Image (cartoon, helix red, strand yellow):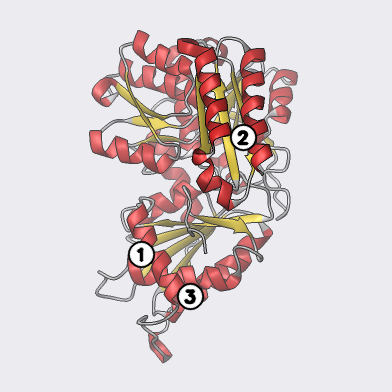
Amino acid sequence: MSRLFGTDGARGIANTELTCELAMQIGRAAAVILTERTQRRSRILIGKDTRASSDMLEAALIAGIASVGADSHLAGVIPTPAVSYLIGKYGFDAGIMISASHNPCEWNGIKLFDRDGFKLPDTLEDEIEALVKNGIEGVPQPIGADLGRVIHEDTATVDYTEHIRLCIDEPLDDLRIALDCANGSAAKTAHSLFSSMGAECFMLSARPDGANINDRCGSTHMENLVEFVKEHKLYGGLAFDGDADRCLAVDENGDILDGDKIIAVCAMDLKRRGKLNGSAAVVTVMSNLGFFKFASENGISTAATKVGDRYVLEEMLQKGYTVGGEQSGHVIFLDYAKTGDGQLTGAMLLAAAKRAGRPLSELGRVMETYPQTLVNIKVSDEIRVGWESDEAIAAAIASAKSQLGEEGRVLVRASGTEPLIRIMIEGKELPQIETLAQQIAKEFRRKC
């Protein structure tokens, strides 16, 4: 069995890789490990996205949790960051989100949160994984009235959206915006949230049917949002992923503001208002070279972590920084949230734009984006973990770095959530970096 937890929880094809049996074992193990300090009956919050398989996995998790005497509190369909927030608001001992984020509907995942609303560190996930592998040996097996119960949290979505609304101190009056909900969790919350802040909202991909989550929509497929914003002459648009923990934006011209640009705009806004702790922003090694140039020119320090919002968060917590995130749109505002929150991110961006009194297109020019190409190669687990010892691959990477010199960079890494090798190259000339990326990809295909 390969490592159960990747960079963002356990994930796989539902009912073949992420089975009911495995979900039940994860529920049982998580309840034991995460609530071992609790002196009363433990209470675990469960949220889910709109995939057809989410109900199935929820039932399996409930069974595992109940089998060790813990209660399951069901929030229903809700964004991942809502689970993180509501753990603290309701005083739960742990939380679980059932979602595979931006993946297609046949995928699903299980994300775990501790009693403080933070995603788990690797060490704690390893403890849970070890218990899953060891089965029920040594695990409590209560009977009768000591078994866990199921409680429905009917006000979860209202409590979460009210929290986000109170985080934003600038009304969004007179803004006409489109919201692409990816047929996912944001379909339950986005319209009420942004309209309550004064925006006129046009909804896209907000009718989930269990199978259409992330299907040619949302933050991974921006084409519909781009065309809608231009056609209807809107101020801009926001696109969320399946569980609404990430957000990308579109300006009035249909140009995309990715996570780097959103962080740049918000960091400048926070700095002007004296709220950018340490005058710093945390990003990952995947962030565009243009972001680092922007930061240097504007007196903002940067820290670059491994890919994964958990590593961004670790750096922010260690240094006390205010904002950080990923190019993909996972952005953390630590004063208000303990994980990436797509709707909070979108609201913060629009509030910054309102304060500046400028269109999104002007704000987006705060940083120059260097051409970047990304090639994903599907590989076996053996190659995914052992590619660095291959001499031909190493030579192709070294050659690309040599040709780019100081005007670009090469980053090759294994995905933490999918069976992929990701090849990212940046430089001044798009044809050159595309050629270099394909040369490296050719060596991976050869090895496959």
Across and down, in percent, residue 346 comes to 51, 31
Any part of residue 172 in sight: no
Q: CA distance from mark 2 to mark 3?
A: 33 Å
Up-down relation of residue 240 to residue 176 (above or below): below
Task: Give the class, few, some or many, for how many residues have Cα within 10 Å of label 2's Cα (few <14, many ≥20).
Answer: many
Q: Quadrant of residue 43?
A: bottom left
Up-down relation of residue 303 to residue 18 (above or below): above
The foreground one among 352 and 81 is: 81
Q: Quadrant of residue 222?
A: top right
Across and down, in percent, residue 182 comes to 65, 41
Question: Residue reaching furthest bottom?
Answer: 144
Across and down, in percent, residue 132 comes to 45, 71
Up-down relation of residue 125 to residue 220 (above or below): below
Residue highlighted by disc 3:
64
Residue for point 37% across, 53% down? 122
Q: Is residue 126 left or right of residue 432?
A: left
Element marked by disc 1: helix
Three-letter amino acid code of the residue under disc 1: Glu
Residue highlighted by disc 1:
127
Residue highlighted by disc 2:
219
Three-letter amino acid code of the residue under disc 3: Gly
Of the 4 image quadrants, the one containing the C terminus is top right
